[in-house]
Image (cartoon, coloured by chain):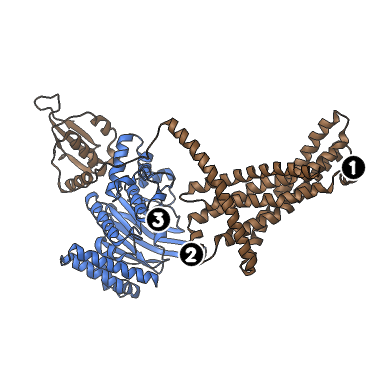
Amino acid sequence: MDMSDRDIAVHVAGLKNGFGEQVVHDGLDLDVKRGEIIGVVGGSGTGKSVLMRSIIGLQTPQAGEVEVFGIPMIGREDTEAKSVRRRWGVLFQGGALFSTLTVAENVEVPLREYYPRLGEKLLDEIASYKIVMSGLAAEAGPKYPSELSGGMRKRAGLARALALDPELLFLDEPTAGLDPIGAAAFDELIKSLQQTLGLTVFLITHDLDTLYAICDRVAVLADRKVIAVGTIEELLALDHPWIQEYFNGPRGRLAADSADRLREGELDEAQADKARQQQAAAEATAGGA
Amino acid sequence: MSGPADFTLDEQGDGKGGGGTLRFTGSLTLSRLRDLPERLEGVRASAIDISGIDRMDTVGAWIVHRAARDGDVPIEGADEGHARLLEQVSAADQPVKMRPDTRTPFLRVLGQVGDWVVGAGHTLYGLIGFFGAVMVAFGAIIRHPRRFRFNAVSRQFEVVGVEALGIIGLMSLLVGVVIAQQGAVQLRQFGAEVFTINLIGRMTLRELGVLMTAIMVAGRSGSAFAAQLGSMKLAEEVDAMRTIGVSPMEALVVPRVLSSVILMPLLGFYAALMGIIGGGLLCWISLDIPPATFVQRIREVVPITDLWIGLLKAPVFGAIIAMSGCYQGMQVKGNAEEVGLRTTAAVVQGIFLVIVLDAFFAVFFTLLGWI
């Protein structure tokens, strides 16, 4: 390894996972550098979520090692893992909010768990700015998850994931199911959090716009391993059929074009929104087909 | 490694009455805050300097922002990253409603009573409506017999009936033993021990066999119906069925209601038999009445109407239990807690209605002259 342990937030080596006969991962290696946003892509069923669950300890792998902040995570006692756990935040696909607690209470759960001394007033204040920061309306605090839309649930989930000011953030398809404007705002939010807090973000996504907009590197999962890691340019230089199809397919190119134009500043906000809406329309038709 | 979060207050000039610069030092992060927020209470400053801190997260930024906001003082010495963080936090400083509105206890109790009354009314109304919907679904199946789901019904037969045989048998056997034992003790005082057999035969066939079975079925299957349908409702499976064009009433409710209606008389009769066997065993062991005599006496003292009464009540009880289970299950919406509440409600409601109806039946059959 050419990088020292301090630069690596997550180190996965020789990971093997399987359910019964079916092998999901076999000899999977992946290093996530500190401070980067790494996008994890792969076809459906390639084990992106299983990889995340293995790293955060919800799934015990059959073989391999997982280190987070240089601390081995496999076979740990729950109490030992706790000290690492408070340094990360996880946003599950559906938000995974506690359905019997309000949004504000949901955000306060990790704070109460780890910092019981904070006091009600400060707790409420922290929860309230986290709620606003995550892009929720101020009225969302006393609502129960069942009263929220899918997008709002995701934002509330993010607010809870960010409650402890984590160094490492796991996001499982954060923009799936959001409208394009909301998805772009979510991307910006994550980017700005990463820049201001020096967050490391492990991002599972199918959203090509997100990949182009905020990911420093992209890891491609296929054939039960990570077949490539790198910037999108580096990946495009590879001659792997799946990668080529993924980024050079009709949607990949659309996302690349709009990302380019955004970068060159030729596109003002209105046009950007139009492009996103077009893509959303394209997704809708593709989804309907 | 940097030190924990701390602050100092420069005493400049006037000292008291809020002068001086508040200087933060160390790591202004959630994990290193310790008691800083408490110590910061009531500290007044004319300026805030954060050039001395080495790390800051959003909680730290919030503390600084709050101190600056409350004292209306400027923040100095922020580097680019810290300034951006402060900017983000202050942008997020909006009045957020944290809790649902609370009411005074008196109003709350009053409201709860009102809610109960309205809720009970709704449940009654809903149950009657549900009964109608079940009847309509039965009618539709009778008109289109091909829509009858034989597999679902036979599966429910197994779950509601076959798998319950062990526990219902054991329970009824023990109930029979208890009736015989208690009956014998009391009747002995009048020298009328022999009437224990009447007691066992009539009690089990007429009342207890069916009633105890109904309670057991409500606990086992009524709750299961509510929980199954409730989870399916939460996972939008029921909605998916509707959009595909499958009627949930026909696919989910009818098989459950039908299997309960058919199985309750069978289970009730089986329970009565087991009760008689239990009573017979006790009579044999403690009263020295041989089994042959016991059976002979049972045939003489138990009128056939007792059997009819038991068997007529059973399908009605089955229908009530299954319908309240399915009705409560279909009412689930929102969250997982609701499934639990509805399951409880299904069992309580099922048993309550069964006992109320049993009382009506008792009066009704007596008036018919079946005594």
Q: Which residue bears the numbered disc 2?
A: B243
The CA span between labels 2 and 3 is 22 Å
Q: Secondary structure at mark 3?
A: loop
Q: Amino acid at mark 3?
A: Gly
Residue B78: horizontal and vertical position, in percent? Answer: 15, 43
Q: Amino acid at mark 1?
A: Pro
Residue B90 falls in image quadrant: top left
Would you call the spot at circle 3 few (<14 residues within 10 Å), some (14-19), or many (20 or more)?
some
Numbered label attached to residue B211: none
Please report contact status of discs 2 and 3: CB closer than 8 Å, yes or no. Answer: no
| Quarter in which the N terminus of chain B is drawn | top left
Tell which residue pokes out farthest to the front in this image.
Answer: B367
Q: Amino acid at mark 2?
A: Thr
Q: Residue at position x 20%, y 33% from top?
A: B7
Q: Among the chains, which one is blue?
A: A
The CA span between labels 1 and 2 is 64 Å
The CA span between labels 1 and 3 is 68 Å
